[in-house]
Amino acid sequence: MYLLGHFQTLQMDKKVVLITGGSSGIGKSIGTYLTSKDFTVYGTTRNLDKYPNFDAFQLIALDVKLPESVEAAVTKVIAAEGRLDILINNAGVGITGPIEETPHEEILNVFDTNFHGPIHMMKAVLPQMRKQGGGVIINITSIAGYMGLPFRGYYSATKGALSLVTEALRMETKNFGIRISNLAPGDFATNIAAGRYHAPVTKGSAYEEVYQKSLDLMNEHVDAGGDPMQVAHKVHAIIEKRNPNIHYPVGEFMQRLSLLLKRILPGKLYEKLLTNHYKL
């Protein structure tokens, strides 16, 4: 059995953090905040050339969809620092559209990024974390991953799948001193809407009117979202816990309340609440 003793000794030094999708939004907020707390932070981006003046923390190239890119980035951090204490799986993409009309290549892309990508990352860091006697992995999922949201079904599916894998991996690695949690944000003011894939609103489609209304509502929620620094504070709190929980939602009260209602309400009643909210 692996002991936490060695890892706790390392905690006295500056802990090394790797954050995927660290160039903007929630990832940048997490990296900036942890840097202010004296962590050594590496963020990742698919295209370093787009950020020539980035100076919030160290930024390295990584595409979570490519295992060889993942291995190269993790190897680079370990070579530079001698260890890797914390992985934050934050990189992700959004997708909207009717289940029936979303192109299949876009479905595969969102799963490659939001689900397979974090798995590539965890496979790459786990051997090092076992070697050093412990570590922390935080998977950034979504409150949307707890429910099948209309016109966001594929996004919900990727985040829900990652959440379940996290539950399993916690049990598989519990003897190695590795602490793994899900952090599920609600709507925050980031640029995710700009990078989200939107299946086109097709004129004459059976979904044309209702999908457009839902799309407008989703974009309003993101624009009016909270400060992503709230997520950063929660990440730091999880890192500091000796025995963190499995799931941590973070967001507005009504978004967190929706998770409780999902657990206690009959399925049809909860579905009715969602359809009323999305004006379906």
Image (spheres, grey):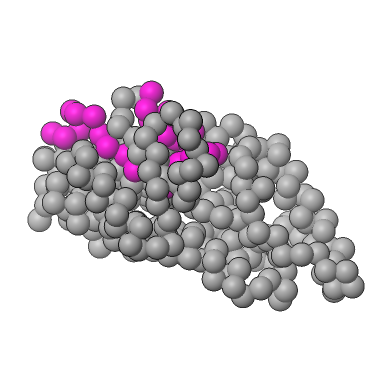
What is the x, y in percent for residue 229? 52, 31
- Residue 20 lies in the magenta-colored region: yes
> Looking at the rendering, which quadrant does residue 167 occupy?
bottom left
Residue appearing at x 72%, y 65% in the figure:
199
Please state, as top left, top right, bottom left or bottom right, where the C terminus lies in the image.
bottom right
16 to the left or right of 204: left
- Seen from the viewer's position, the closer of residues 251 and 227 is 227
Residue 31 placed where, x, y %?
A: 42, 34
**Residue 26 in view:** no
Name the residue at 60% across, 56% down. 94
Q: Residue at x 31, y 25 (%)?
A: 38
Q: Position of residue 277 (x, y in %)?
A: 77, 53
Q: Please say if 138 is above or below 38.
A: below
State whether residue 143 is above or below residue 147.
above
- For the N terminus, the quadrant is bottom left
Q: Along the horizontal axis of the image, is 8 left or right of 70?
A: left
Percent of width and height locating residue 43:
40, 41
Q: How many marks?
A: 0
Q: Is residue 100 magenta?
A: no
Q: Is residue 40 above or below residue 216?
A: above
* The residue stretch that appears in magenta: 9-36
Point 67% across, 48% down: residue: 194
Q: Relative to 33, does residue 71 appear above or below in the rendering?
A: below
Q: Which is more toward the observer, 41 or 228?
A: 41
